[in-house]
Image (cartoon, rainbow, N blue to C red):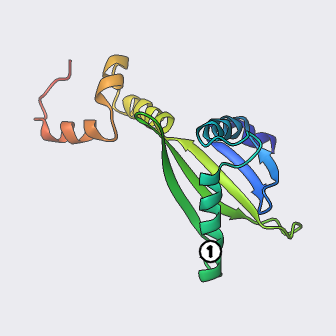
Amino acid sequence: MLFLEGFTDGIVIFSQDGDLLYNNQSGKTFIRYLSQLEETTANQLPPSLWKICDCLLEGRKLFPENPLILTQEFPVLEGECLRVRVQFLNFPEIDAVLFLLILEDQNRTAQSLARLEAVYWSLSPRRGRYGCNGGVIKLVTRRLPSNCIFL
């Protein structure tokens, strides 16, 4: 499980009983932050995350043959959002129900996307900070005449 430590997303694996089986460093940080918001201890899964897992269990009852992944977004601070994806994790040697939570800081994801677009469009660092936001550059450049020069 050492390779999971390198993920920027939080990875949390736990049983239906609430036993924490694995938590990478980002996962620990996110769980600690959500625990403070919901006034639970850091070694407990916050109630908002348990609710998603309960919904996943209900979904399994309704659609037993279909693999389900539930997603929910939590506004954590003004202008910041945390996306949570929950799915079942199956290990043939373990009979218990296991959950895999992936906790994504959407601001970090947006910044990474902006950096990638800046490289793709060969933008200066300044333009990359201000002009690159989810495909806006593509839209603008399509509308400009072909002889237009970027400064």
Task: Give the left or right position of residue 80, taking residue 128 as reference.
Answer: right
Name the image quarter holding the C terminus: top left
Q: How many marks?
A: 1
Position above or below: 48 against 118: below
| Residue 37: image location, x then y, percent | 58, 38
Going 26% across and 35% down the picture, which residue do you hit?
137
Task: Determine crowd level at label 1: few under 14, some 14-19, many 20+ residues with C-alpha closer than 10 A.
Answer: few
Name the image quarter holding the N terminus: top right
Task: Give the left or right position of residue 27, taking residue 73 as reference.
Answer: right
| Residue 92: image location, x then y, percent | 84, 69
**Label 1 is placed on what type of residue?**
Glu
Going 40% across and 34% down the picture, which residue do you hit?
79
In the picture of the structure, the residue carrying the numbered disc 1 is 58
Q: Does residue 60 appear in this view?
A: yes
Task: Kindly indicate the quadrant of the structure image that contains residue 40.
Answer: top right
Going 22% across and 42% down the picture, which residue do you hit?
139
| Residue 55: image location, x then y, percent | 59, 68
Position above or below: 151 against 61: above
Farthest residue, direction front: 39
Farthest residue, direction right: 93
| Residue 143: image location, x then y, percent | 13, 40
Task: Kindly indicate the quadrant of the structure image that contains residue 65.
Answer: bottom right
Q: Secondary structure at mark 1?
A: helix
Position above or below: 31 against 119: below
Q: Identify which residue, 92 or 21, lies in the foreground.
A: 21
Q: Does residue 63 appear in this view?
A: no
Q: Identify which residue, 132 or 78, lies in the foreground.
A: 78
Q: Identify which residue, 99 or 5, lies in the foreground.
A: 99
